[in-house]
Image (cartoon, rainbow, N blue to C red):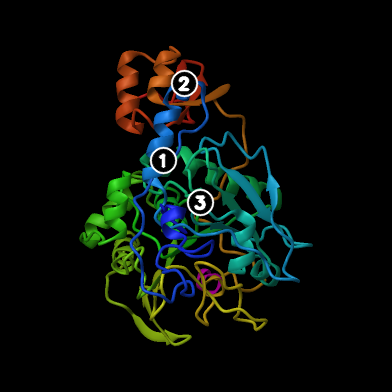
Amino acid sequence: MPSHLIDPAAESGSGPGNGPGNRPGNRPGNGPGRRAARPSRPATRHRPAATLLAGMAAGVTVLLLAVLSVVALSGPAGAAAPPQEVTGFGTNPGNLRMFRYVPPGLGDGRPVVVALHGCTQNAAGYAAGTGWTRLADTYEFSVVFPQQQTANNANSCFNWFETGDTRRDSGEALSIKQMVDRAKRDNGSASAYVSGLSAGGGMTSALLAAYPDVFSGGGVIAGLPHGCANSVSSAFTCMSPGVGSSPKEWGDKVRAAFPSYSGPRPKVSIWHGTTDATVQPMNATELMEQFTDANGTDQTPDTTDTVGGYPHRVYGGTVETYQLTGMGHGQPVDPGTGATQCGTAAAYILDVNICSAYHLVRFWGIDDSAPPTPTPTPTPAPTDPPYTDTVIGTATDHYVARRVTVAEYNRLGAAHGYNTPFTLYRCEAGWSDKTDCSPII
């Protein structure tokens, strides 16, 4: 989705550029929505024990094909240089790729922004279409563009609905956190922010819940609440017709992602089109309820106004919503050279005369050259980890390899799922699924 899960054949219409929410022949985001294809299960990550399941996984993948596919974008002439790949940023249990854009001459201590693409997109295309690199030049921050791989999900969607990829210190969530750690070390940064579109928006919600000590702010665009889904079938239900819960029930899901955390929560900006047929607009309301409750404020707006002609509400100074009247499924941009403009229109990158990335920068408070606001708990200087080796596999893989006992196998299966790959760490006392080498429980 920006994806969630989509079948390119079912969603592409007459050719590339048509996707969820568009009928062939209509401009992206303007036509009536067509029904999305059934999603496919993320492809199994490469590992020896997965070979016997490859044929089965391939068939299942066809069913899971992301319901929010987005085509790769190409940047306009004169745009900022494309992001560059960074390797060796950590153990990378989610098997993601890291790309980064650093403005020429960027000073030490400037913030890090993470921008998460949608299905079938890539880092370079998302960077070019959304305008993040130009804003990075203007407001002096670096941008990390994580990139999904088809080995993890057939349509290159971030697995926002897989518990093993959204849990703190696990899977794709941990890989993204390791990218942030690397970017902070390289530039002496003390603060980080995250935004994403559709499936990237779903992953953004998960990261804000799992790492409130890492991210000072977030932006969820055409996304979904954290904890709404834990399987492909429940993901489709969340997307449409949507799932309604009380603010406290939603907030409890955020608090459960890091139970021991008691510090300040990230500011959250929520954007959604009123005619989005792929991720129903009610998800914006559920997101507002989730993060207002988690952030300790109520669901009555303190400010109700319009920005760029669109309804805008602010709750307790910590959560805001944009209701994009008449907009379908995608990320809002406003192409041009003006100070408040950004982006290039493309599939699911919609020219609706407002630049979401610019307003995110403003809401987060990183729109000038002043020193950034530190995160509640700055990342400490790197130290040698307590483990000596890592290995990625399913609970069954680890048991077959005799890394764990039967009892530990059952605990790992209950915690991570029996068919979801995750990392084990070789510690002095044996193998653990935690980076601090605590026992498997």
Q: Measuring 69% from the left and 70% from the top, which residue is drawn there?
A: 76
The amino acid type of the residue labelled 1 equals Thr
Q: Quadrant of the C terminus?
A: top left
Determine the CA span between mark 2 and mark 1: 18 Å
Please name the residue that numbered disc 2 is placed on: 49
Q: Nearer the viewer, mark 2 or mark 3?
A: 2
Q: Main secondary structure of the magenta part?
A: helix
Q: Tell me residue 70's x, y (percent).
A: 50, 59
Furthest toward the right, the residue is 105
Q: Tell me residue 439's x, y (percent).
A: 39, 23
Q: Tell me residue 34's x, y (percent).
A: 35, 66
Please name the residue that numbered disc 1 is placed on: 61
Q: Is residue 362 magenta?
A: yes
Determine the CA span between mark 3 and mark 1: 33 Å
Q: Earlier in the sequence, mark 2 or mark 3?
A: 2
Crowdedness near tag 1: few (<14), some (14–19) or many (≥20) residues, C-alpha within 10 Å: many
When asked about the image quadrant of residue 394, the answer is: top left
Which residues fall within the magenta stretch?
Answer: 360-364
Q: Measuring 66% from the left and 47% from the top, which residue is drawn there?
A: 185
Crowdedness near tag 2: few (<14), some (14–19) or many (≥20) residues, C-alpha within 10 Å: some
Report the front residue among 282 and 415: 282
Q: Which of marks 2 and 1 is in front?
A: 1
Q: Which of marks 3 and 1 is in front?
A: 1
Q: Against 97, is 289 above or below? A: below
Please name the residue that numbered disc 3 is placed on: 214
Q: Can residue 338 be seen in this view?
A: yes
Q: Which of marks 3 and 1 is nearer the N terminus?
A: 1
Q: Against 403, is 97 above or below? A: below
Which SS class for mark 3? loop
